[in-house]
Image (cartoon, rainbow, N blue to C red):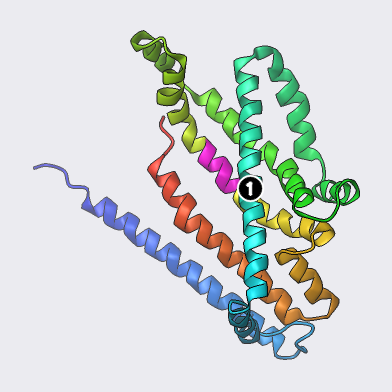
Amino acid sequence: MPRSDPPAAGSKGRRDTAGRLLGELLVVAFLAIWWATARGLPNFVLPGPLAVAHRLLQLLGEPEFLANALVSTLRVILSVLVACVLGGLLALLANARPAYDGIINERIKPFLNSFPSIGWAILASIWFPAGNFGVVFVQVAILTPFCLINIDQGFRAIDQELLEMGRSFTRSNPRIWLRIHLRLLTPFILSAIRISYGIAWKIALVSELLGAPNGLGYMMLQAQSTAEAVTFLAVCFSIVFIFVLGDRLILVPLERKFPVTR
């Protein structure tokens, strides 16, 4: 009789369900601990989850908050795209010209990867006036090495025999790039974008705190200066929701559509 696979599939489904259930229980436990801890503290020190949720719903109806959220989101998207382009160009140069490999991977990449994030933010506040350019500069400087590392690994994973086979069908370099290089690099590019997207939201707030007249980081600074812990935490959770929406609705489906081929 032919061998059937449903038991294995069912076992995997049960493991996935158990994992999701465990994750939900951890969220409930976190909220319960937060609620119990906040009961004995004033709101300006640690507000409870219900107060934060109520304030978050209020913010969603305020034009000022929506405008600041849009500004921060656009800055993050622009920074991720620019960093991906710069990291991709550096990776391309390192793999296309062996003479530059040592310069990029042994000099530029370690420097960018180890330079403190707060250092870029402080330098931007000194070099540039408060505004979009300084915030985007900080994010791009921090995100570029992450994109460089991921896309460089994509170049190194390309099968040279596959390229030779492609050249046997056509001598057109642009066609080879579109049909082979780009197709094989796409999963690594998407991975670089997904990693950078999460990191960008963290560093965006630091850069906005030090040198931006608007954005969610600016709103958090205002809340901190007036001891509005409820608003501060509500803005923090709004960032989590924005990140999850972008990740689950756009980046995860793209990664599933372009899986890594081995």
Q: Is residue 178 left or right of residue 56?
A: left
- Locate residue 43, reporting x and y percent: 75, 87
Res 148 seen here: no
Residue 102: within the magenta? Answer: no
Q: Which residue is mark 1?
A: 78
Image point (22%, 48%), residue name: 5
- Locate residue 185, reporting x and y percent: 49, 31
Q: Range of the magenta residues?
A: 189-195
Above-or-below relation of 232 to 118: below
Above-or-below relation of 201 to 218: above
Q: In the image, what residue type sits under mark 1?
A: Leu
Image point (79%, 59%), residue name: 212
Furthest residue toward right: 126
Q: Is residue 86 left or right of residue 249?
A: right
- Quarter placement of the C terminus: top left
Residue 192: within the magenta? Answer: yes
Dot 1: what SS? helix
Q: Is residue 134 left or right of residue 154?
A: right
Res 46 seen here: yes
- Locate residue 122, reporting x and y percent: 87, 51
Considering the whole magenta stretch, tell me its main secondary structure.
helix
Total of numbered circles in the picture? 1
- Locate residue 145, reporting x and y percent: 69, 37
Image point (34%, 61%), residue name: 14
Q: Where is residue 155, by image quadrant?
A: top right
Above-or-below relation of 53 to 104: below
Q: Is residue 211 left or right of residue 257?
A: right
Q: Where is residue 29, by image quadrant?
A: bottom right
Image point (67%, 69%), residue name: 236
Above-or-below relation of 203 to 188: below
Crowding around mark 1 (Cα neighbors within 10 Å: few <14, some 14 to 19, many 20+) is some
